């Protein structure tokens, strides 16, 4: 299926204006940009896309997330706007190869709403990226409810990217375990909280696009839904024992699809209409992900849905 249209829904960049915004560049940004020049060099990036027959990438800001930059709230707002302006310019200059989403920190929900609105209405972005916890505060916190209401009214999806677990074992830094598995634990906890707190029930038309094949949901979805349905009598009645359907309502990308068992388990849990081609480029092995999707025991039509059809339908592109 080398000629099949491929739209990568979850890849990362450092826009040039954002990269040059800092008077003293954060260490993680400097290190990652040096190791992975495709975070900044869009010409080389497009060359790689051409070699893999990827027609378009939906680009988002690469980590570290805004909350990990250790800056005050005023500076955080300036950084967010610089990043989003840079994403817009990068997409605008790409000849249609890149489509952008914005990034906000929910640490200041009011500003997050204003910036998300600017990104979508003024910069014509496809949606907004947030991370899996806000300084340790869960995504289902009542404080963030106005943001979800605003995003639902704007009619655009929320991309959820993992971030570091807070107040966890200090030795998670060994072996890079905080990213290796900590990110997937944190993403899974975020999804549990979005369902358990009722966010997904209250905002049924709001779509969430989850990085890394939905993390642990394909493996633990049954256990998670059972606990959600039975952990509190009031919640059980409120969710009407439908927590599993809410867990399955998330959309997921194929980053981590380099590992075939994970890809197959996500396919079993979410089915083809909730899976979209996404690579986590430049960290993910895009070629291996493509090969694994092509080797799934599903129809050619279902593969086309994963590679581009679902993105077109869900994102309106």
Image (tube, helix red, strand yellow):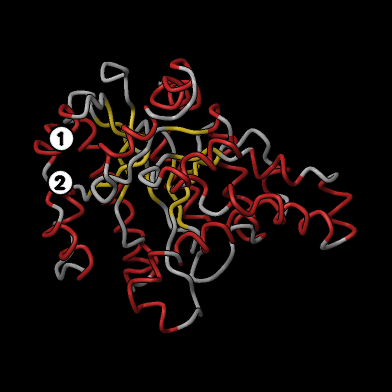
Residue 141, by quadrant, is bottom right
Q: Is residue 146 left or right of residue 304?
A: right
Q: Is residue 286 above or below residue 147?
A: above
Q: Position of residue 92 (x, y in %)?
A: 22, 30
Q: Is residue 93 above or below residue 10?
A: above
Q: Position of residue 77 (x, y in %)?
A: 36, 59
* Residue beneath disc 2: 38
Q: Residues within 10 Å of mark 2 (few under 14, many from 20)?
A: many
Name the residue rendered at 44%, 32% in the picture: 276
Foreground tag (2 vs 1): 1
Q: Residues within 10 Å of mark 1 (few under 14, many from 20)?
A: some
Name the residue rendered at 15%, 46% in the picture: 38
Q: Nearer the viewer, residue 287 or 94?
A: 287
How far separated are the C-alphas under marks 2 and 1?
9 Å
Name the residue rendered at 65%, 56% in the picture: 192
Numbered circle sitting on residue 48:
1
């Amino acid at each position: 299926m080398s000629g099949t249209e491929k739209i990568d829904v979850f890849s990362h960049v450092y826009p040039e204006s954002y990269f040059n915004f800092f008077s003293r560049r954060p260490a993680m940004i400097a290190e990652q940009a040096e190791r992975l020049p495709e975070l900044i060099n869009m010409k080389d990036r497009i060359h790689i896309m051409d070699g893999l027959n990827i027609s378009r990438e939906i680009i988002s800001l690469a980590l570290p997330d805004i909350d990990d930059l250790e800056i005050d709230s005023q500076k955080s707002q300036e950084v967010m706007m610089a990043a989003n302006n840079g994403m817009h310019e990068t997409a605008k200059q790409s000849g249609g190869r890149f489509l952008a989403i914005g990034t906000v920190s929910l640490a200041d929900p009011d500003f997050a709403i204003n910036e998300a609105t600017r990104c979508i209405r003024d910069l014509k972005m496809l949606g907004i990226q947030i991370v899996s916890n806000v300084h340790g505060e869960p995504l289902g916190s009542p404080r963030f409810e106005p943001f979800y209401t605003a995003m639902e009214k704007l009619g655009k999806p929320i991309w959820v990217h993992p971030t570091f677990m807070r107040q966890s074992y200090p030795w998670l830094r060994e072996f890079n375990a905080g990213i290796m598995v900590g990110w997937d634990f944190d993403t899974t906890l975020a999804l549990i909280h979005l369902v358990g707190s009722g966010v997904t029930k209250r905002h049924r038309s709001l779509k969430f696009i989850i990085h890394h094949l939905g993390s642990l949901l394909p493996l633990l979805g049954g256990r998670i839904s059972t606990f959600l349905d039975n952990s509190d009598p009031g919640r059980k009645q409120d969710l009407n024992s439908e927590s599993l359907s809410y867990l399955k309502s998330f959309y997921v990308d194929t980053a981590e699809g380099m590992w075939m068992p994970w890809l197959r388990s996500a396919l079993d849990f979410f089915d083809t209409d909730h899976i979209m081609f996404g690579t986590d480029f430049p960290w993910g092995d895009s070629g291996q992900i493509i090969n694994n999707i092509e080797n799934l025991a599903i129809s050619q039509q279902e593969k086309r849905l994963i590679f581009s059809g679902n993105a077109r339908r869900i994102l309106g592109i």
